[in-house]
Amino acid sequence: MSKKIEFDYENQHYTLEYNRQAIVLMEQNGFIAEEYVKKPMTMIGLAFRFAFYKNHPKITQEQIDKIFDIFPNKQELNTALISMIGECYDSLIAGDPEKESKNIEWKIV
């Protein structure tokens, strides 16, 4: 996953990004990619919350809400989060070339 969102808030540097575990937890908490357009308030909240998970797992929901409330240009933020989530899904499907060299060979017959 290459895309990240970085910012400073109250003398703390934050790096928001996703890994597979963050996406799984986000989905377990109700995130459904296909419903992002239908339920933007719910989905962007979950997307923003779980973008903290990889690098800042101990941040409180209250602190995340404060940051989100003052985050500028939420349309651009929304676009970035969707793109970052998409990259994570793509990496799952594409696999890891280093690990795949050790994988079982299979075919459809």
Image (cartoon, rainbow, N blue to C red):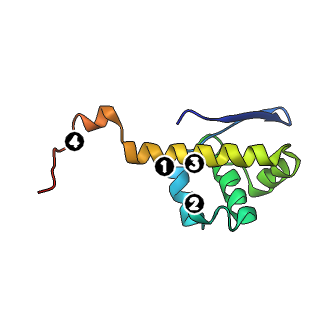
Query: Residue 19 at what x, y percent from top left?
Result: 52, 44
Farthest residue, direction left: 109
**Sequence-first disc among 3 and 2:** 2
Residue at image mark 2: 33
Which residue in the protein does label 4 denote?
A: 103
Q: Amino acid at mark 1?
A: Tyr
Q: Quadrant of the C terminus?
A: bottom left
Q: Are marks 1 and 3 in contact (CB under 8 Å)?
A: yes
The crowd level at tag 1 (other Cα within 10 Å; few <14, some 14-19, many 20+) is: some
Vertical comparison of 50 with 37: above or below:
above
Nearer-N-terminus badge (2/1) = 2
User: x, y (%) of residue 81?
Assistant: 66, 47
Question: What amino acid is at disc 2?
Answer: Ala
What residue would you read off at disc 1? 89
The residues tagged by marks 3 and 2 sit, at their Cα atoms, a distance apart of 9 Å
**Which residue: 36% across, 42% down?**
95
CB under 8 Å between discs 3 and 2: yes
Q: Which of the two labelled residues, at mark 1 and mark 4, occupies the earlier sequence position?
A: 1
Instruction: Please rate how many residues cluster around mark 4, counting C-alpha atoms within 10 Å: few if below 14, some from 14 to 19, many from 20.
Output: few
Find residue 7 and report its image quarter.
Answer: top right
Indicate the amino acid at tag 4: Asn
In the figure, is residue 50 to the left or right of 98? right
Upstream in sequence: badge 4 or badge 3: 3
Q: Nearer the viewer, residue 84 or 25?
A: 84
> Dot 3: few (<14), some (14–19), or many (≥20) neighbours within 10 Å?
many
Q: Residues within 10 Å of mark 2 (few under 14, many from 20)?
A: some
Q: Is residue 66 visible?
A: yes
Q: Which residue is mark 3?
A: 85
- Distance in Å between CA atoms under marks 2 and 1: 10 Å
Q: Secondary structure at mark 3?
A: helix
